[in-house]
Image (cartoon, rainbow, N blue to C red):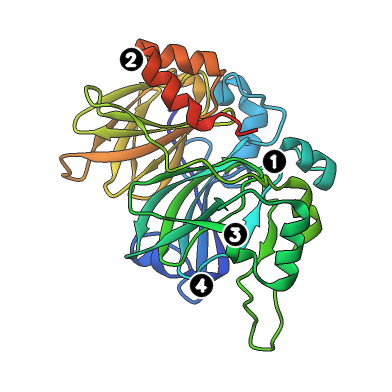
Amino acid sequence: MSTLYPMLVRPRFVERIWGDHNLTGKLGKDAPRDKPIGESWEIYEENAVENGPYAGRTIGELRAEMGAGLMGHVRSDELFPLLTKLIDAQDTLSVQVHPNDRFAHELEHQPYGKTECWYVIAAAPNAALTYGFSRDTSPEEYTRLVQEGKLDKILRQIAVQPGDVIYLPAGMVHAIGGGIMVYELQQTSDVTYRIYDWNRRDAEGHSRELHVDKARQVLDYHRASRDKIRPLRDDHQHRAFLIAGPYFCMEMIEAGQAQNVGTYNSVVAACALDQPVEVEAGGQKVRLARYSSMLIPAAAGTYAVRPCGGAKTAAVLVAYVPVSKDATRTELLGRGFSADQIDSFLAQFAPVI
């Protein structure tokens, strides 16, 4: 078997107090049934490959061993830069913020900050997310409102439904609401500053630890002006560009027949949605079950996606690290989008300040 084959990845399941059993019951994951599982870490530095010659080897080991064969233009001597998750939030999460790269270095001695995005898989009626501040605020007002238990007075709420795409740059205050399941793509970082927990207390009357001082340094205090992402759709090729940020890009491929896709000289993380798909790369065909994930080596150059299991159509989310903003723009121009369409799309990922 070619060493450039599609590599199925074994997920890591994480217990969370706000989790439940929907990752198993609704998405078909093989998660423990005796614990509230909130997260399935799908693609992660320490996860192992399940199939082929590299079965049992971790992504981190293969990153170092295969170098550009796996990673393409992405540095292979640093932590694998992408982390993908499936998240089941059956209760509202605490309000959080993440540092950017500079603050991650300064405050936590970590290599990456945490910019992330969400693709909404499922949402209960009237489900909503906390997404930034509803008006401009300040470090002083933020600290006072946390102390008074009133931070919710200036938090912005947005309603979501399945198929929505949300972009969360580092520094934006946010929280997933109860009854929402998402696919999350992020920089590889687990640095989270909890700043507000809706005044909840446990059975013993204790509140959870907050990280008010560190969060004070990294928060964006401006009124949130971002909204749900307006994807750039290529109906002719049955593809949609969902995210085109500085750290990662994400597309949806809607396959009714074989779709041939380039790797953009980057390792590619793929996750099938409601239907299984067959992925072919390096001359090898591998079945990707619904809500399962795989890596496609950069050096494969191209890969093909097609429905399987009798389905007429199937959708898969694919993520990769862009070479540059200019390279992304050139790719979009090559697909026939106008300069105005591209500028409008890319503006959604520009820094606010």
Q: Are marks 1 and 4 in contact (CB under 8 Å)?
A: no
Residue 48, position as x, y percentages in the image = 56, 46
- Going from the N terminus, do you reach mark 2 or mark 4 first? 4
The amino acid marked with disc number 2 is Arg
Mark 1 → mark 2, Cα distance in angstroms: 32 Å
- Towards the viewer: 182 or 303: 182
Q: Are marks 3 and 1 in contact (CB under 8 Å)?
A: no
What label does residue 113 carry, if any? 1
Q: Which residue is mark 2?
A: 335
Q: Which residue is mark 3?
A: 154
Report the residue at 43% width, 53% height from top.
Answer: 182
Helix, strand or loop status at disc 4: loop
- Going from the N terminus, do you reach mark 3 or mark 1 first? 1
Residue 287, position as x, y percentages in the image = 32, 41
Residue 2, position as x, y percentages in the image = 45, 24
Q: Is residue 324 above or below residue 136?
A: above
Numbered disc in front, either 4 or 3 = 3
Q: Which residue is mark 4?
A: 36
Q: Is residue 3 visible?
A: no
Query: What crowding class fits label 2: few (fewer than 14 Cα within 10 Å), some (14-19), or many (20 or more)?
Result: few
Q: Quadrant location of residue 81?
A: top right
Q: Is residue 93 above or below residue 319?
A: below
Query: What crowding class fits label 1: few (fewer than 14 Cα within 10 Å), some (14-19), or many (20 or more)?
Result: many
- Going from the N terminus, do you reach mark 4 or mark 3 first? 4
Report the residue at 59% width, 31% height from top.
Answer: 247
